[in-house]
């Protein structure tokens, strides 16, 4: 049972790294700004999930706190960038 859980977490970490690579490619190459914001959103979500899987694998609580900080900052930055793209200003 332990080896099945360890193997599943390792496989999910590998797939999350692949997803992060695709999201980073979209951030770097995205033809429009909206594509880049979407890639950045996917990048922070997958980074959060990768930190959570590291926390599950090692049992360390520090990974969960870092994932929470990344999730909060990622949400705020996505909302700010979306507002900037719609209106041209962030603070009214």
Image (spheres, rainbow, N blue to C red):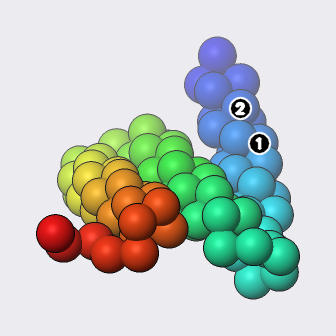
**Toward the viewer: 82 or 50?**
82
Residue at numbered disc 1: 11
Q: Residue at x 77, y 42 (%)?
A: 11
Residue 36 lies left or right of residue 48; in this view the side is right
Question: Which residue in the rendered view is the most extreme toward the left?
Answer: 92
Q: Is 64 on the left-hand or right-hand side of 37?
A: left
Q: Is residue 8 above or below residue 19?
A: above
At a point 59% along the width and 65% down the height, the residue shown is 37
Residue at 64%, 16% in the rendered image: 1
Q: Residues within 10 Å of mark 2 (few under 14, many from 20)?
A: few
Above or below residue 7? Residue 63 is below
Q: Is residue 33 above or below residue 76?
A: below
User: Which secondary structure, mark 1?
Assistant: helix
Seen in the image, is 90 located left or right of residue 21?
left
Residue 8: mark: 2
Q: Residues within 10 Å of mark 1 (few under 14, many from 20)?
A: few
Secondary structure under the numbered disc 2 in the rendered image: helix
Residue 11 seen in the current view: yes
Residue shown at the point (41%, 75%) measured from the top left: 88
* Residue 74 visible within the image: no
How far apart marks 1 and 2 lie (CA) works out to 5 Å
Give the image location of residue 77, x and y in percent.
Answer: 36, 65
**Which residue is more in the foreground, 28 or 91?**
91
Residues 35 and 11: in front is 35
Mark 1–mark 2 CB contact (< 8 Å): yes
- Image quadrant occupied by the C terminus: bottom left
Could you say where residue 34 lies in the image, as x and y percent from the top left? 65, 64
């Amino acid at each position: 049972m332990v080896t099945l859980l360890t193997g599943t977490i390792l496989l999910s970490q590998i797939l999350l790294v692949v997803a992060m690579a695709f999201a980073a490619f979209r951030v770097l190459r995205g033809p429009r700004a909206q594509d880049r914001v979407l890639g950045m959103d996917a990048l922070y979500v997958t980074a959060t999930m990768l930190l959570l899987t590291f926390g599950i694998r090692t049992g360390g609580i520090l990974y969960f706190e870092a994932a929470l900080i990344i999730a909060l900052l990622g949400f705020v930055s996505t909302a700010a960038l979306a507002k900037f793209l719609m209106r041209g200003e962030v603070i009214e």
